[in-house]
Amino acid sequence: MLTVVVYVNETPVARALVGNMSDLADVSDYKVRAVEQGAPDLGIPASDVTGLIKGHPRRTSVWHLVRKIAEVATSEHGGSGAGTEW
C-alpha cells in the first residue's frame, strides 16, 4: 500500500491510498482512492474519488506514479487517461 499525503502549513488536506493489484509485476495495475478536504474560501469542494491506473511500469521513478495518482484525484470520474478504466 502506498499513501500520498498533501500538507498545507503542516495540516493534511488530502490523502490518496494506492494498492498494487498485480502482485508487484513489472507492469502493474493500481486501485486509487483520493480524498480531499474542501476549501470553501477558495471555492474548492471536498472530493472522494476512486479509480484505476492500468499498465504502470514499476521500474520508473515513484514520481511518475504520483503524477498518475494526482490525475485520478483531479478527474471527475476517476481514472488517469489512456489505458485507465473507471
Image (tube, grey):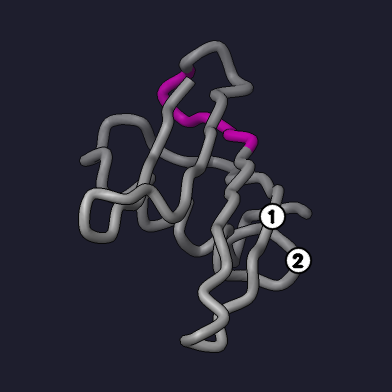
Q: Nearer the viewer, mark 1 or mark 2?
A: 1
Relative to 65, say whether 36 is above or below: below
Q: Is 29 one of the magenta-colored residues?
A: yes
Task: Answer left or right for 32 relative to 57.
Answer: right
Closer to us: 8 or 80: 8
Element on which disc 1 rests: strand
Q: Residues within 10 Å of mark 2 (few under 14, many from 20)?
A: few
Residue occupying image coordinates x 48% and y 20%? 1
Closer to us: 42 or 22: 42
> Which residue sits furthest top?
23
Magenta residues (range): 25-31
First in sequence, mark 1 or 2: give its number: 1
Relative to 61, say whether 25 is above or below: above
Provide residue 78's location: percent of width, then percent of height: 69, 59
Check whether the beta carbons of the residues at disc 1 and disc 2 lie within 8 A of each other: no
CA separation in Å, label 1 and label 2: 7 Å
Question: In the rendered structure, which amino acid carries the disc numbered 1?
Answer: Val
Closer to us: 49 or 46: 46
Task: Answer left or right for 84 relative to 67.
Answer: right
> Which residue sits furthest front?
41
User: On the image, numbered disc 1 is attached to which residue?
Assistant: 49
Provide residue 20's location: percent of width, then percent of height: 55, 24
Element on which disc 2 rests: loop
User: On the image, numbered disc 2 is attached to which residue?
Assistant: 77
Relative to 45, say whether 31 is above or below: above
Residue occupying image coordinates x 78% and y 54%? 86
Question: In the rendered structure, which amino acid carries the disc numbered 2?
Answer: His
The tag on residue 69 is none
Provide residue 63's location: percent of width, then percent of height: 26, 48
Task: Answer left or right for 43 relative to 8.
Answer: right
Please identify the quarter of the rendering in which residue 48 is found.
Answer: bottom right
